[in-house]
Image: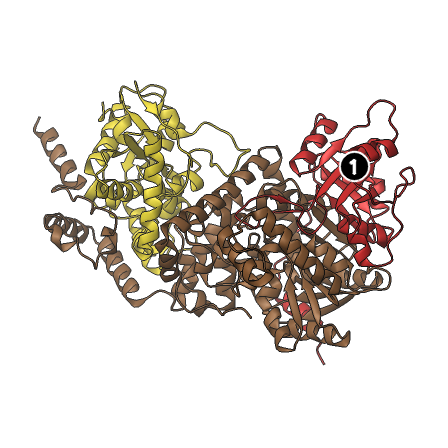
Chain colours: A brown, B red, C yellow
């Protein structure tokens, strides 16, 4: 069972993570390393910017024709012998899957990475029905054993250390205490999960890309866990958000060229599986989920966030995410894209997220599908301000400042007052002033530029 | 009664923006030396591109390279199996080597397009300890777009297939790369 | 050519010498510069808090003050980007605002694109690290961003700095990571803001920078706060001060 996210705002949680300076620095270095690998890979693709533009245009076409393309996808899947189910929300998604599993008498499920199933809380729902679900992606397996949510959509356990995992596997798998060797631990997980694969009644996977033209799905992994999981059991259920659709088979070439490079700096994921039909003697079902995506479709400033291919590049490049970790966001999907998607689902809970950013724009520049992420974060701030998401003291403070800025004489006077106050450091160097924890107050010179300019002009006139 | 499908499609219809045309085909930049790029990218993916030494047959090359693989299951005609076809899934996990035919090799990412006409070949490719892929040398293409346009892909992409680039791997423990996650621990490609 | 000088509110009050350097530099390059005394602020603090309605009159005031100039030059990437990129769709948009959106330039942009400066009479025999203030860097595209590996061109700040005698530009491990100021972020997420500033400062220190320069005094104010809290001998200087020869 996964612990629920607490109600604290990002700033409070990030304080905690930063409190362990060592861990924060290691987390930051690890994700910067992934960002560097991404840069190295893109350097070898001369048409990288053109690919991004192409992907963005394909997505613009897709979302503006999403109903007809989804209908075509449904028809083509059916013609291939694949059953498509439609879920308006998370509860329906869970009910459909539970229904399918119960119909097949499936009690032991293996699941590969699907942020959608996280979003819907599938594991908990199935657990409540006595159905055991094992997450087979190593990172997901680790956080499942730790009973916590993943902290990154591609690197779920990036917030843990090898010692953490060594201790975890010692407790759950009986590996020797103190053994923290990544290769040894991976082999231990391999052996344990192979048992689960062989005993599984059903396999649940995500969908990286769904192809309208042919009714196929593409599933991308490095570990091969999705492939084993959809191969051995006789029931395969694939879950996808409506925005995972791409129009044509040829378009898949564009997206597969972008995905792995943006995510981890690999030129391709090890496995890019393309599945059109169920295997002989087995059943394949696809659950197509809305859960707020059609609402996002109707928001012009945020619509492009539906381009997202869940690569995680924005998280790796974000200086805030790197230093404070995914759990600081308190949302299923963290980081820059999470800070845009989550307020749409629950503005009250996630109103602080668009402010957990300096709007540096690095995310916008790495996004392989050209979502203007930092612009959308700013747009959410405007939305939040209109709907009570900005605190009263801040509103009043900003309102006062705006008043001063509309009246030049007031601004001049306030400047003079500031210069006087600046001569009394005790006013600022105390615990209530958040600036001074680690920073010296700026020195306020006795004369600002305005006065210096006026003096200069006066002396010029004299001469 | 409105089904969820109707509800969802209705919501999309109500909220979608004005239609934007598909941008059309993409013009990639093509690699100058696909063969060299391919070998390099296979290596980057943790695999290895193997060249046949002078006069060597494919079967001999496979035996040479995988000298420590006692039980071998081959789906390539010219390479004989040394193990019987397993009767259950557990049997596949006992295999040392699976020899699988590929249709196309893609230079830009070191991937091989493998079509699984045979479910058993797919099992072997995932559960055996090591994997050898055999691809016709003339079926090497440069960017992915060429792979998608190639007749060998278009004629086989309609049921089950995979672009396979290297052995299975993970870096989920402190970003340390470990080759051999859930799938095979090594992968070699023979361009013949 | 009538040029109006817009000095950001923080620079006016806290870094008047950098403002003066901007003015002197433009005059040395033969530009007739006016500093309209009624200017106040570009509206960024309100806009970045999402308070578009509070920002709009401040922006309108800016537009009114600067409407009659051929160029508005601003020694700040973030203020310039605010006017050029973030004033669309504001209530009460005037013709004056539409005009200043097209005439407002950041200082390096103006020197590079309009004046096409090829010579400067300035020296700075120091090791100088360039801090890439985010708005100028990724919104005004003053220099190539590290993320867009295929977009290569020579950055405007470094082109201008290369005209300064005896200067050494130092390297960085992370060439364009954010300093952590971020407006209200600097107090809303104070610990994180300081951590980011400390990391920038440490990066410059590892490469032996004596001076950290940038196009934005808001970043420099934050970095200077960190430097002085650590009793570091490293100084900050706005790029205008270096180009004007103030640090010879």
Q: In this rendering, is residue A444 above or below B35?
A: below
- Horizontal and vertical percent position of residue A392: 30, 67
Can you see residue A73? yes
Q: Are there few (<14), some (14-19), or many (20+) residues within 10 Å of tag 1?
A: some
Quadrant of residue A387 in the image? bottom left
Can you see residue C180? no
Q: Mark 1 lies on which chain?
A: B
Q: Which residue appears at 68% of the width and 31% of the height?
A: B40
Which of the pair A107/A71 is nearer the observer? A107
Q: What element carries label 1?
A: loop
Quadrant of residue A253 in the image? top right
Which of the pair B28/A264 is nearer the observer? A264
Which quarter of the figure is the C terminus of chain B placed in? top right
Q: Mark 1 points at which residue?
A: B66
- Horizontal and vertical percent position of residue C151: 53, 33
- Left or right placement of residue B18 versus residue C85 in this view: right
Which quarter of the figure is the N terminus of chain B placed in? bottom right
- Horizontal and vertical percent position of residue A306: 59, 57
- Left or right placement of residue C32 versus residue B169 in this view: left
Which of the pair A71/A240 is nearer the observer? A240
Q: Which residue lies most toward the left here?
A: A462
Q: In this rendering, is residue A199 above or below C42?
A: below
- Horizontal and vertical percent position of residue A290: 63, 67
- Left or right placement of residue A302 versus residue C28 in this view: right
- Left or right placement of residue C114 versus residue A367 in this view: left
Q: Which residue appears at 68% of the width and 55% of the height?
A: A191
Number of numbered discs visible in the structure rendering: 1
Q: Which residue appears at 30% of the width and 42% of the height?
A: C66
Quadrant of residue B133 in the image? top right
């Amino acid at each position: 069972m996964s612990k629920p996210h607490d109600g604290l705002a990002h700033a409070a949680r990030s304080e905690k993570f930063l409190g362990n300076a060592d861990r924060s620095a290691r987390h930051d270095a690890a994700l910067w390393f992934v960002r560097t690998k991404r840069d190295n890979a893109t350097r070898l693709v001369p048409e990288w910017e053109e690919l991004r533009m192409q992907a963005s245009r394909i997505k613009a076409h897709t979302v503006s024709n999403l109903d007809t393309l989804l209908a075509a996808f449904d028809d083509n899947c059916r013609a291939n012998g694949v059953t498509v189910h439609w879920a308006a929300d998370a509860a329906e998604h869970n009910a459909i899957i539970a229904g399918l599993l119960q119909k097949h008498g499936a009690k032991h499920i293996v699941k590969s990475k699907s942020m959608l199933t996280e979003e819907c809380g599938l594991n908990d729902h199935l657990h409540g029905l006595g159905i055991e679900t094992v997450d087979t992606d190593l990172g997901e397996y680790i956080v499942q054993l730790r009973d916590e949510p993943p902290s990154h959509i591609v690197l779920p356990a990036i917030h843990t250390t090898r010692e953490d995992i060594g201790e975890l596997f010692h407790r759950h798998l009986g590996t020797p205490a103190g053994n923290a060797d990544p290769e040894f631990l991976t082999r231990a997980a391999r052996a344990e999960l192979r048992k689960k694969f062989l005993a599984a009644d059903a396999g649940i996977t995500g969908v990286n890309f769904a192809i309208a033209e042919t009714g196929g799905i593409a599933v991308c992994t490095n570990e091969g866990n999705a492939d084993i999981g959809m191969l051995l059991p006789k029931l395969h259920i694939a879950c996808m958000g409506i925005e995972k659709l791409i129009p044509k088979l040829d378009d898949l070439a564009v997206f597969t060229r972008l995905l792995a490079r943006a995510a981890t700096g690999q030129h391709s994921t090890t496995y890019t599986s393309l599945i059109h039909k169920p295997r002989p003697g087995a059943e394949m079902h696809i659950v197509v989920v809305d859960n707020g995506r059609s609402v996002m479709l109707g928001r012009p400033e945020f619509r492009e966030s539906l381009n997202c291919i869940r690569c995680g590049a924005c998280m790796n490049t974000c200086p805030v995410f790197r230093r404070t970790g995914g759990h600081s966001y308190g949302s299923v999907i963290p980081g820059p894209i999470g800070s845009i998607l989550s307020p749409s689902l629950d503005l009250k809970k996630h109103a602080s997220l668009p402010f957990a950013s300096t709007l540096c724009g690095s995310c916008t520049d790495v996004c392989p599908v050209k979502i203007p992420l930092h612009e959308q974060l700013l747009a959410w701030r405007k939305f939040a301000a209109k709907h009570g998401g900005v605190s009263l003291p801040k509103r009043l403070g900003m309102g006062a400042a705006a008043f001063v800025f509309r009246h030049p004489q007031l601004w001049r006077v306030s400047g003079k007052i500031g210069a006087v106050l600046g001569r009394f450091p005790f006013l600022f160097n105390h615990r209530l002033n958040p600036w001074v924890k680690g920073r010296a107050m700026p020195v306020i010179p006795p004369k600002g530029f305005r006065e210096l300019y006026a003096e200069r002009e006066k002396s010029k006139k004299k001469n | 009664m409105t089904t969820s499908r109707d509800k969802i499609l209705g919501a999309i219809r109500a909220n979608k923006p004005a239609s934007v045309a598909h941008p059309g085909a993409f013009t990639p930049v093509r690699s100058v030396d696909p063969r060299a790029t391919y070998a390099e990218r296979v290596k980057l993916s943790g695999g290895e591109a193997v060249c046949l030494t002078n006069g060597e047959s494919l079967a001999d090359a496979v035996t040479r390279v995988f000298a420590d693989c006692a039980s071998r299951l081959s789906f390539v005609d010219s390479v004989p199996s040394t193990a019987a076809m397993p009767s259950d899934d557990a049997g596949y996990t006992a295999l040392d080597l699976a020899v699988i035919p590929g249709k196309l090799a893609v230079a830009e990412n070191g991937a091989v397009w493998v079509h699984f006409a045979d479910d058993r070949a797919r099992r072997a490719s995932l559960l055996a300890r090591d994997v050898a892929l055999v691809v016709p040398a003339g079926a090497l293409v440069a960017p992915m777009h060429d792979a998608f346009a190639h007749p060998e892909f278009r004629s086989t992409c309609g049921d089950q297939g995979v672009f396979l680039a290297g052995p299975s791997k993970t870096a989920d423990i402190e970003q340390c790369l470990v080759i051999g996650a859930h799938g095979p621990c090594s992968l070699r490609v023979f361009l013949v | 050519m009538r040029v109006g000088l817009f000095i950001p509110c923080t620079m006016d009050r806290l870094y008047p010498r950098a403002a003066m350097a901007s003015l002197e530099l433009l005059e040395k390059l033969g530009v007739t510069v006016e500093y309209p005394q009624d200017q106040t602020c570009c509206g960024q603090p309100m806009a970045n808090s999402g308070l578009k309605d509070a920002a709009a009159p401040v922006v309108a005031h800016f537009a009114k003050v600067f409407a009659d100039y051929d160029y508005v030059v601003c020694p700040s990437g973030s203020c310039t980007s605010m006017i050029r990129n973030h004033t669309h769709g504001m209530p009460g948009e005037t013709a004056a605002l539409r005009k200043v959106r097209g005439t407002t330039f950041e200082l390096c942009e103006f020197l590079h694109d309009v004046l096409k400066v090829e010579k400067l009479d300035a020296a700075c025999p120091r090791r100088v690290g360039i801090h890439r203030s985010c708005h100028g860097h990724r919104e005004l595209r003053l220099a190539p961003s590290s993320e867009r590996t295929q977009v290569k061109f020579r950055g405007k700040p470094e082109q201008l700095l290369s005209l300064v005698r005896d200067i050494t530009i130092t390297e960085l491990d992370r060439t364009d990571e954010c300093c952590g100021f971020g407006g209200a972020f600097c107090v809303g997420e104070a610990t994180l803001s300081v951590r980011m500033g400390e990391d920038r400062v440490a990066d410059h220190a590892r490469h032996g920078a004596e001076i950290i320069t940038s196009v934005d005094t808001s970043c420099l104010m934050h970095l200077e706060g960190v430097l002085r809290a650590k009793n570091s001998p490293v100084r900050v200087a706005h790029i205008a001060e270096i180009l004007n020869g103030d640090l010879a």
